[in-house]
Image: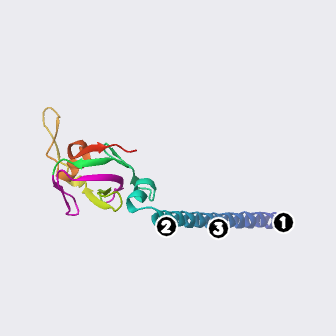
Amino acid sequence: MTPFLFFSIIAAILFGSFFLAAYLYSVRQRRKQEAHDAYLRQKKEELSPYAFYRTVQSADNQIFSFGHIQAGDRFRIRRDFVDHGGQTFHAGETYDFASAFFLPYEGVYTLFLSSDGKEITRMYLHIPYASIKISVSDRRGELTHEELPAEEDICCHTEEYFELLLPRE
C-alpha cells in the first residue's frame, strides 16, 4: 500500500465521520425542537393566555420583568398615554403583568397584560434610538438630555407610569 493511498483512505474515513456526525446532530436538534413545539402547544391548550405568557418561556427574547414590575404583579396606570400601536391607556386602569418581549432590531417592547386574569392585552412601547437627543456643552462638557417622548419615558421610568398594587404570589 502506497502512502498516498493510505492517507486517502484515512481522509475519506475522517470526512465520512464528520458528515455522519453533522447529520446525526441535525436530526437530534430537529427532534428536540419538535418536542419543544409539542410542549408549547400542549401548554397553550391547558392554560389561559395570561397563565401561558406568565409562566412559560416561549421565546428567547421573552422577559418576565419590566422595570419594577415582575410576572404576576398587578399594577395601576398613573397617567394617560398612547402606546406605539395607537391604543390609549387611561389613568386608573389596572392590569396583571404576564411578560414582555423585546425586539432590538425594531426597538419595541411588547408587554403582555391582562385585565381579567385570562385574556391578553398587548402594550407596544417603541424606543426610537434616533430620537434620543444629547447635546454637549462646548466649554464644560456637560450632557443635557432633551425631553424624552412618552414611550421612551415609560421605558426609563416605569414607577412614574405604573403603580404596583399587588405583588406576585
Q: Position of residue 100 (x, y in %)?
A: 35, 54
Q: Position of residue 5 (x, y in %)?
A: 80, 67
Pointer 1 residue: 2
Query: Quick one: label 3, few (<14), some, or many (20+) residues within 10 Å?
Result: few
Region rendered in magenta: 80-105
Nearer the N terminus, badge 2 or badge 3?
3
- Assign the N terminus to one quadrant of the image: bottom right
**Residue type indicated by callout 3:** Tyr
What residue sits 14% from the left and 32% below the top? 140
Camera-near label (1 vs 2) is 2
Is 128 on the left or on the right of 51, as rendered? left
Does residue 64 belong to the magenta stretch? no
- Assign the C terminus to one quadrant of the image: top left
Query: Quick one: label 1, few (<14), some, or many (20+) residues within 10 Å?
Result: few
Pointer 3 residue: 23
Front residue of this view, candidates 168 and 62: 168
**Label 2's element?**
helix
Pointer 2 residue: 41
What residue sits 62% from the left and 67% below the top? 27
Is 46 on the left or on the right of 103, as rendered? right
**Label 1's element?**
loop
Nearer the N terminus, badge 3 or badge 1?
1
Distance, label 3 to label 1, CA atoms, is 32 Å
Which residue of the protein is positioned furthest toward the front in this rendering? 116
Front residue of this view, candidates 137 and 92: 92
Place residue 105 in its image quadrant: bottom left
Q: Position of residue 96 (x, y in %)?
A: 32, 52
Residue 111 visible to an observer of this rendering: no
Does residue 99 belong to the magenta stretch? yes
**Label 3's element?**
helix
Q: Position of residue 92 (x, y in %)?
A: 18, 50
